[in-house]
Amino acid sequence: MKPPYWDQAKRELSRRDPVMGAIVRRFPRIHLSPRGDPFLTLARSIVGQQISVKAAQAVWERVVAAMPEVTPGAAIEAGPKRLLACGLSRRKVEYVLDLAARFDGGELVPERWQMMSDEQVVAELVEVRGIGRWTAEMFLIFNLLRPDVLPLDDLGLQRAVSLRYRGGRSVSTGGIRRIAKDWQPWRSVATWYLWRSLDPVPVEY
């Protein structure tokens, strides 16, 4: 499902920014796709932290096999022993179970996020053990489909801006922010296209 703002964002980014326009033209038929259930998305993000994409996929497949559905209740029922057997570290098991308890206990209510600003959602999510700002920003982009998120700490964004706008020279977060002024209010879309300029195949976050 294409986000409703996608085509408008493409047109406006291409008109304002020639570099972005060239990248958009390279990828005319693909777009950001939503990542589904909020708990599953956040749990998968925790599983994938600090390990390779290949390793994360292998562990995640074992997590999915261990539960009939990846839900807060199923994670709590699985408990530490079964999650450890999937290949999760003890710390990640703690993080996933803490996340599940917050969903199950009504502390995290996805329906409420639709009424909150980006920063309000980030502030709520980073209270969860194992979720930092980067994970919260990926959630805003891929699950809530927020159009104007600029994940300054993302290494892929930093590398793409360096290559596409600075001839490979390093760029500060302040420099990225200045370049990104032309992308507002579509900074999520611009970031997604910059990721594609490095890797044409969208990655699961």
Image: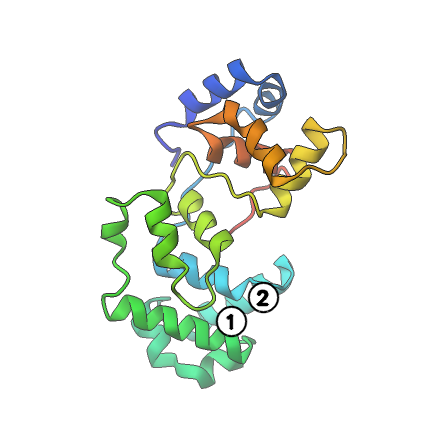
Return the residue nearer the eye: 44 or 132. Answer: 132
Q: Quadrant of residue 23?
A: top right
Coloring applied to the structure: rainbow
Dot 2 surroundings within 10 Å: few (below 14), some, or many (20 or more)?
some
Q: Residue at image x 52%, y 66%?
A: 47
Tag 1, which secondary structure? helix
Across and down, in percent, residue 49 comes to: 56, 63
Can you tell which mark lies on residue 58? 2
Tag 2, which secondary structure? helix
Q: Which residue is mark 1?
A: 62
User: Is residue 181 at least partly visible in the picture?
Assistant: yes
Q: Which quarter of the figure is the N terminus placed in?
A: top left
Q: Residue at image x 56%, y 76%?
A: 87
Across and down, in percent, residue 83 comes to: 47, 78
The three-letter amino acid code for the residue at tag 1 is: Arg
The three-letter amino acid code for the residue at tag 2 is: Ala
Across and down, in percent, residue 64 comes to: 45, 68
